[in-house]
Image: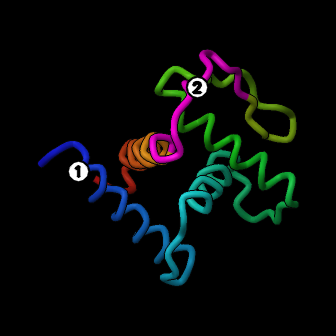
Amino acid sequence: MSRDEQLKQRWELVVNKLSNQFADGDTLDLDAIIYLIGVQELGQLDKTFKKDQKLDLMHIAICKLLTPYGYYSLEFVDADGWPHYRTIENLPHLKAGEQSVLMKEAIVNYFLEMEYIN
């Protein structure tokens, strides 16, 4: 099986599992999954977030997802439990489709590492 085909199958598995668990079977999109990862990483699962906090959660998720690629590293966690990341290397200029593939790969790897999928 090609690497692209394996990524596609694993991505569909992640989307299906998360959609069934968090969206009553409605299909979650990439942004919704990134948001869920941000909430997971913050660890404040029972809290309601304001719009700007939701954007911050997505930023946390993106930093966490791209840390293994050498783009970010965790700098510290503040008194409220919010992680703060430092940019190690700027992201390369990617076309929209390339960005999507990078994020999907990073998300699949995140859930493999968490043993949510195998």
Q: Residue at x 74, y 24 (%)?
A: 76
Q: SS of the residue at dot 1?
A: helix
Residue depth check, mark 1 versus mark 2: number of the one nearer the observer: 2
Give how far across and how far down residue 112 sits, in percent.
36, 47
Q: Amino acid at mark 2?
A: Leu
Give the magenta part as a residue range: 85-99
| In front of the other: 35 or 79 | 35
**Looking at the image, is mark 1 or mark 2 earlier in the sequence?**
1
Give how far across and how far down residue 20 sits, in percent.
46, 77
Q: Residue at x 12, y 49 (%)?
A: 1
Q: Quadrant of residue 110?
A: top left
Judging by the rendered image, the residue that carries numbered circle 1 is 6
Q: Amino acid at mark 1?
A: Gln
Q: Residue at x 54, y 65 (%)?
A: 29
Residue at the limit of the structure toward the left, as seen here: 1
Q: Quadrant of residue 92?
A: top right
As drawn, 60 above or below 73? below
| In front of the other: 47 or 49 | 49
Give how far across and how far down residue 116 sits, in percent.
39, 56
Judging by the rendered image, the residue that carries numbered circle 2 is 91
Asked whether residue 46 is drawn in magenta, I would say: no
| In front of the other: 21 or 94 | 94
Residue at the limit of the structure toward the top, as seen here: 88
As drawn, 111 above or below 79? below
Asked whether residue 88 is drawn in magenta, I would say: yes
- Residue contact at pointers 1 and 2, CB within 8 angstroms: no
